[in-house]
Image (tube, coloured by chain):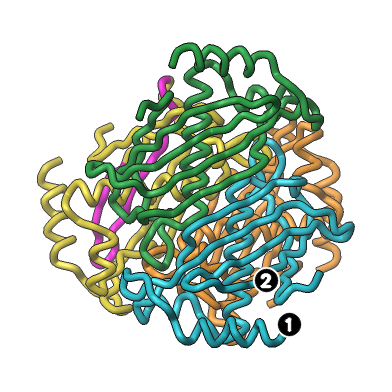
Chain colours: A orange, B yellow, C green, D cyan
Amino acid sequence: MKYMYQLELKVRDYECDLQGIVNNANYQHYYEHTRHEFLIQHDISFAKLHDEGIDFVVARVEMAYKTPLKSGDSFLSVLNLTQEGLKYTFHQKIYRLPDMKLCNVGRFDCVVLDHGKLCRNDELDVFVASLQIGN
Amino acid sequence: MKYMYQLELKVRDYECDLQGIVNNANYQHYYEHTRHEFLIQHDISFAKLHDEGIDFVVARVEMAYKTPLKSGDSFLSVLNLTQEGLKYTFHQKIYRLPDMKLCNVGRFDCVVLDHGKLCRNDELDVFVASLQIGN
Amino acid sequence: MKYMYQLELKVRDYECDLQGIVNNANYQHYYEHTRHEFLIQHDISFAKLHDEGIDFVVARVEMAYKTPLKSGDSFLSVLNLTQEGLKYTFHQKIYRLPDMKLCNVGRFDCVVLDHGKLCRNDELDVFVASLQIGN
Amino acid sequence: MKYMYQLELKVRDYECDLQGIVNNANYQHYYEHTRHEFLIQHDISFAKLHDEGIDFVVARVEMAYKTPLKSGDSFLSVLNLTQEGLKYTFHQKIYRLPDMKLCNVGRFDCVVLDHGKLCRNDELDVFVASLQIGN
């Protein structure tokens, strides 16, 4: 399968909890960082949008935990992005390196808020459409 | 609706991100802390179980973000627990205080691993059965 | 010894790392939350100040780790505040409950930035002076 | 100045707080991750040591905040390590990239606990001595 973006990261020991594995909530951090790096690579800054009163927020999350990441593990965080009306959905996965064992599958439904109000965002729509054509 | 457990918590400023609202991943922290406090109240220690080689792990998460929590907000974190075979499901919600505005709805499917192997756990089964009778 | 403010908190399991003890960085979170709660109790909001372009920032930190906090521990986070010129210093300690074993000693030197520029802040100066008289 | 180890990292948006800058406690995370990566590069695993009952713990921290890191910033985290009796001291700095503006200066005094008891550790002593000769 092809992905629009992939980012290689490494587990940091402070991200592991007393079970000796990466704490569940940190996968959400990994996924968020991957989304923001993907967007910034396409000149869309989450922080800059916020300063303009536009917030790109997560409305719904699903994550399936398959294999836990541990201290010392490196991993590949991949994503695809689709749009359906006002909803932008990031389809994300985390694979352990180098064996490409699937660790986590995530789905993040996001929406755009302009000064707190649900809306379309032309910049994002054009961007997502360009991605679709590209694939 | 009745809940088996509820915990009042308060947003800490470091949990807010540059959008000025609680970062998405922190809801997972709030929910985890609520589950562990609920279990410990019933003499089931997540940390002690781990020392015995038994890990109670999250297999699947769903969260819907309704209203963002902000700096200074207090909130009520509530839960119910059901069991279906090897799967223990925590149904959790977060309500802002004092207006009881629904902020987040979560569902956490958990399983028990005994030294890494999926299994039943009598202690937990008896506990969950006792909860069902009680409600 | 007398303290200007004290806050009772409880360790959350996700704050513990793979050594089974609270990760070092989380003490800084406990201390920050204590400072902000202390200030808010006196109607000084860290978040509101930021919205007005005034940031109360930490310039220097010292922390001594005496006894590690563990899963299940409750603790008392206490503070005193002194001022010397442009420098506001929080003297903070964390004691385990109920045995009042000293866990951590911290010292946080803070300064006020008005739109990024070091300055005095009358509101804070009056506040700190009022504390001194009170003790 | 020469450093025994340096690691390039990038700010993740979730590490920024409502002031729009990296939250103070995260510098401690950056420094910890740098220390662990440095040790692992020399085949000393923090996690593996813990499993053998040996914990390398921070006893004292000093950090001076010079320039805040922001969303989008990359930085260089550098360290030197010295030993004095039972105390291992990491001298660490964080420089913003690419302008090498000094952001933070840290000093971390660490000790070795063997099953909770302060002790020497031959492996670490030989390692640190080898570093001294090398520089």
* Camera-nearest label, 1 or 2: 1
Q: Same subunit under labels 1 and 2?
A: yes
Quarter in which the C terminus of chain D is drawn: bottom right
Check residue D42 for magenta coloring: no
Q: Is residue D72 left or right of residue C12?
A: right
Q: Which residue position is annotated with label 2?
A: D80
Q: Between A62 and C84, which is closer to the camera in this rendering?
A: C84
User: In this picture, is C131 found above or below C17?
Assistant: above
What residue does disc 1 label? Answer: D135
Residue at (47%, 39%) from the top-left corner? Answer: B104
Amino acid bearing label 2 = Asn
Image coords of residue D75 (percent x, y): 77, 60
- Name above or below for residue C110 compared with residue A96: above
**Residue in view at x 63 percent, y 68 percent:** D34
A118 or A44, which lies in front? A44
Quadrant that contains the N terminus of chain D = bottom right
Give the structural element (helix, strand or loop) at label 1.
loop
Q: Give the amino acid type for the residue marked by disc 1 in the picture.
A: Asn
Q: Earlier in the sequence, mark 1 or mark 2?
A: 2
Residue A82 appearing in the image? no
Q: Nearer the viewer, residue C64 or B48?
A: C64
- The magenta-colored residue range is B79-98
Q: CA distance from mark 1 to mark 2?
A: 10 Å
Instruction: Classify mark 2: helix, strand or loop.
Output: strand
Say whether residue D68 is visible: yes
Disc 2: CA contacts within 10 A as few (<14), some (14-19) or many (>=20)? some
Q: Position of residue C55 (x, y in %)?
A: 70, 30
Residue B37 in percent (x, y) is at: 28, 47
